[in-house]
Every structure is written in C-alpha cells, then in structure tokens.
Amino acid sequence: MNRRLFTILGLLLVFAMLGMLVWVSNQLDTIKHTPKVPVDTHSESQVAPPESGETRTASEALLEGYGDPGTPPIEDLRKIQRVAVGYFTVIKDAQRFPIGGNADFAAALRGENPNREVFLPAGHRLFSADGLLLDRWGSPLIVHPQAWRQLELRSAGPDRIPHNEDDLVLSSTGNSSGAE
C-alpha cells in the first residue's frame, strides 16, 4: 500500500515538474518574441494633433490642455496623475516593468509594459527628445515612487531648478504643494 502510494506521488511529482518546465519554456519564448516598441527620438517635441482618421488614446484625452497658460500649473501634474491611475488600472502585472523614475514611467506610457499597451504615442509633445516626461516649462518631471502603484510627481517650476521653493509637488494621495 505504501509502495503504491509513493509510486503515485512520485509520478505526480514528475508530471508536475514536466508541466512547470513546459510553462517556463513558453514564458521564455513569449518574452523573446515580444516585439519592442520603437522609441521615436526626433528632436522636435511638439507634435501636430492627430489627423481625422487617427484615434487618440484615453491618456491623450486626459492630457488635453496640458501646459495651457490659462490653467494653474498644478493641474498639469493632476492630469499626469490621472494617466498614472489609468496605467496601474489597466496594467495588472506592472511589477514586471517596475517604475523607478521618469524614464521608466515614460517608457511604460509609450508601450514598454507587460501588455504592450500604448498610452501615449512616442512623438507626443509631453516627451522630450530623450523620451522623458516634461513639465510646462520644458524641464523633466521628477517621478518618485512612494509605494506600490503610487507616484509622487514634481515639477521644477518656472525657474527650472528642482528642489527649491517654486517647485510644484503632487503626492500620490492628491495633496499638492507649491505654486497653485
């Protein structure tokens, strides 16, 4: 009886290990064959609005009016925060491509994420020639992860010098500081 039980358990263990090997092999093939999203690094950061035949992403709609002089600058950070909330809602397996700063967040929005979902096209006016997210004054945003799926956003402000009194800061909870 014990010998039969151990034989059955041994066979189950062997089949489980074979199944795991097949699964890992498929995962590696998927990673190898997933196309990379090209990053457009042209020098001009302004892009014409989409033509009538092109569809805009939801993130582009959320960013409508970004940098508009008629709105308070903190609204720009709120718009980006809404895009971040949308990103973390859609991308369930975000830990495969963790966000450690501006470059990671910008790449994720361009489609370098587990779903290969493009939130903003590479040529969007929000991106610098280097592919970083910019504030309304043309300085790279400071994206600081606070916790899982929570980002603090900081703009260097009109003087374009980060970490001084004119900076705009929006925490992941929506609290803001700086020039409103």
Image: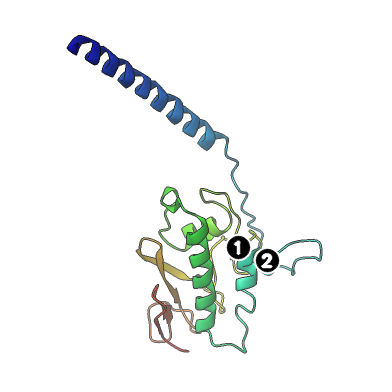
Residue at x 47% of width, y 60% of height: 88
The percent position of residue 86, horizontal first and vertical second, equals 52, 64
Q: Of label 2 and label 1, which has the lower sequence position?
A: 2
Q: State the image quarter where residue 135 is shown.
A: bottom right
Q: Are marks 2 and 1 in contact (CB under 8 Å)?
A: yes
Q: Residue furthest left?
A: 2
Name the spot of residue 152 as percent of width and height, x first.
Answer: 40, 71
Q: Which residue is mark 2?
A: 44
Q: Residues within 10 Å of mark 2 (few under 14, many from 20)?
A: few
Q: Secondary structure at mark 2?
A: loop
Q: Is residue 119 above or below residue 29?
A: below
Q: Which mark is residue 129?
A: 1
- Mark 1: few, some, or many residues within 10 Å (few <14, many ≥20)? some
* Quadrant in which the N terminus is drawn: top left
Q: Residue furthest front?
A: 1
Does residue 85 sit above or below 1 in this rendering?
below
Q: Secondary structure at mark 1?
A: loop
Indicate the amino acid at tag 1: Ala
Compare residues 70 and 115 and report the one nearer the observer: 115
Q: Residue at x 47, y 53 (%)?
A: 92
Distance (Cα) linking label 2 and label 1: 7 Å
- The disc placed on residue 146 is none
User: Up-down: is 80 above or below 93?
Assistant: below
Q: Is residue 1 left or right of residue 169?
A: left
Q: Which of the two residues, 64 or 155, is positioned nearer the viewer here?
A: 64
Residue found 47% across the figure and 63% down from its top? 102
> What amino acid type is highlighted by mark number 2?
Glu
The x, y position of residue 48, in whole percent, is 74, 69
Quick one: which residue is furthest to the right in this view?
Answer: 52
Query: Is residue 136 placed above or below 18 in the rendered structure?
Result: below
